[in-house]
Image: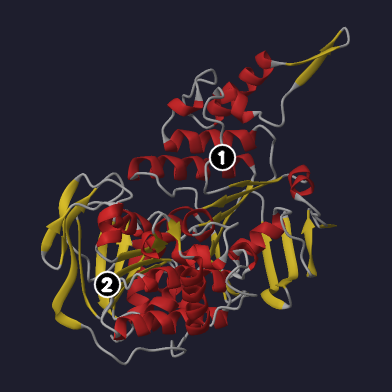
Amino acid sequence: MLLQARGVGKAFSGVSVLRDIDFNLEAGEIHALAGENGAGKSTFIKILSGVYSHDSGHIELDNKTVEFKNIKNSELAGIRTVHQEINLVPFFKVYQNIFAGDEIRKNFLGIDYTDDTLMIKKSREVFAKLCIDIDPLSYTHGLDTSRQRIVQIAKILVQNPRVMIFDEPTTSLGEKERAQLLEIIKSLKSQNIGIIYISHNLDEIMEIADRISVFRDGAKVGSKDIEECTKTSIVSMMIGKKEYVLYSRKEKPDPEATLLRLEGLTNKKLKNVNISLHKGEILGIAGVMGAGKSEIARAIYGIDKIEHGRTYLKEKQFNPDIHFSLNNRIAFVPEERQAEGLVANFSVEKNISLAYLNSFKRGLKIDSKRETATAKEYIDTMGIKTAGPGQAIKFLSGGNQQKVILSRWLYGDFEIGLFDEPTKGIDVKAKEDIYRLIGKMADNGKGVIFFSSYLPELLTVCDRIIVMVNGKVKGEYKTGEPDVEQHIFEAMLSGGTNNECPD
């Protein structure tokens, strides 16, 4: 056996995120990992990659126990990861990216230099093995996404890896490029490389994997040869028998009062998206990474340009623009709150007043007393745990940071809320608080679009759920229907659904 994990566990701050994982990988095998977001896949892969150390159990490579204290330890053992984000230097030549950090060096008469000729030769050799025609002397920024992904693979192959981990490698690729990349990954088996393949796309897994292991709630629930599986059986293993009862809505939206309508919305990421939002409704938008969820929010708010289609606010057509959104009570809580949603070094009160700063003006100055009083009001109302309005927001927990961002928009009395992954990276109690806050907003007549890749929370909070796949609306579901989670998962992960919408 090439790689084995036995009883591997991991906890953060006393909270177990991975429990008693047994896993094995043979040379020349593609072993897929599947599971919901938060199932433990990423934590397990980070342990194998040396990002995290495991708290219990052990890992064996070639039947010898190994301990990876850092990424370099893992790489020296022959374990390499192709991450879903492309991490190349755009203005480097292809061969320079392939050998970046691992340059081949020579010494002549005491002078140390890089052997560009040999690196170019080895780059050509690895592309020949992959049957891909890429010029090592071309600049990386001139390559399309799929070829940049192939350069990432070549960067690993020149190091003669024993194990390759692919983490959602086809994200953002078109169908032709996706098919080409999958063929390349399958060809690596003949080089006796063991491959761990992580994907939310069950069609891909069924096409290329030899075996599949399914993770759920930090534990491995089973491993099967792919011949024994169907997409439906894999989904059943992923979701188990769950009851989504932590929080449920009692009020119902007004189907006659349409707040927002998208008609044929199209841009570089979205294709003919038709969506409506009603007064008092929480509309869920589900999809895996790259499906087009966040792009809908960004297009509505006016961050990303719309190429075709129409947008209507209370049945009046408008052109999305950030200033229009602010002036017409449209709120946007972005997925990446640290980078886009807050100013880390600003105080809690400054982050609350940020969007509507003009309303705090007294003459040419900001009315700091009113700003502080407003912050105190929302700290009490929202239950924000902080030392006070003047505390820098960077010292708050993720859940409390999110409550500050929600307070900002509540102060402006928004009418439509675009909440992109609003519970990402926060603990269970904080999630429940956010669910209740969003539910209360809808009960008060606001319309909320809740974008999430985590299906349980959508089933818990939302009235309807729309599934996005590759920038298109794939299906629409009501959250009280029988077996709705099964149907939504199949739509999200493979595109197969009886509720498929026309393009």
Q: Residue furthest front?
A: 363
Element class at badge 2: loop
Q: Is residue 437 left or right of residue 448?
A: right
Q: Considering only vertical position in the picture, is 44 above or below 174?
A: below
**Which residue is painted at 48% across and 24% down in the image?**
134
Q: Give the spatial CA distance, label 1 vs label 2.
A: 39 Å
The residue that mark 1 highlights is: 87
For this orientation, the residue located farthest to the top is 109
Task: Say which residue appears at 31% left-offset and 66% top-offset.
Answer: 467
Q: Position of residue 408 (x, y in %)?
A: 43, 68
The residue pinned by badge 2 equals 415
Give the amino acid type for the residue marked by disc 1 in the picture.
Asn
83, 338: nearer the viewer: 338
Q: Residue 441 has which mark?
A: none
The residue drawn where x is 79% and y is 59% is 60
Q: Position of residue 278 (x, y in %)?
A: 20, 75
Q: Locate the C terminus by quadrant.
A: bottom left
Compared with 42, 380 (above or below) is: below
Task: Give x and y (percent) for residue 458.
Answer: 39, 76
Residue in the image at 43% along x and 81% along y? 435
> In which quadrant is the N terminus drawn?
bottom right
Mark 2 closeness class: few <14, some 14–19, many ≥20 residues within 10 Å: many
Nearest to the observer: residue 502 or residue 363: 363
Discs 1, 2 touching: Cβ within 8 Å: no
SS class, disc 1: loop
Residue 345 in view here? yes
Sequence-wise, the earlier of marks 1 and 2 is 1
Please, what is the three-letter code of the amino acid marked with disc 2?
Glu
Between circles 1 and 2, the one closer to the viewer is 2
The residue sitting at the bottom extreme is 250
**Percent of width and height locating residue 251:** 28, 90
- Asked if residue 36 shows in the view, the reply is no
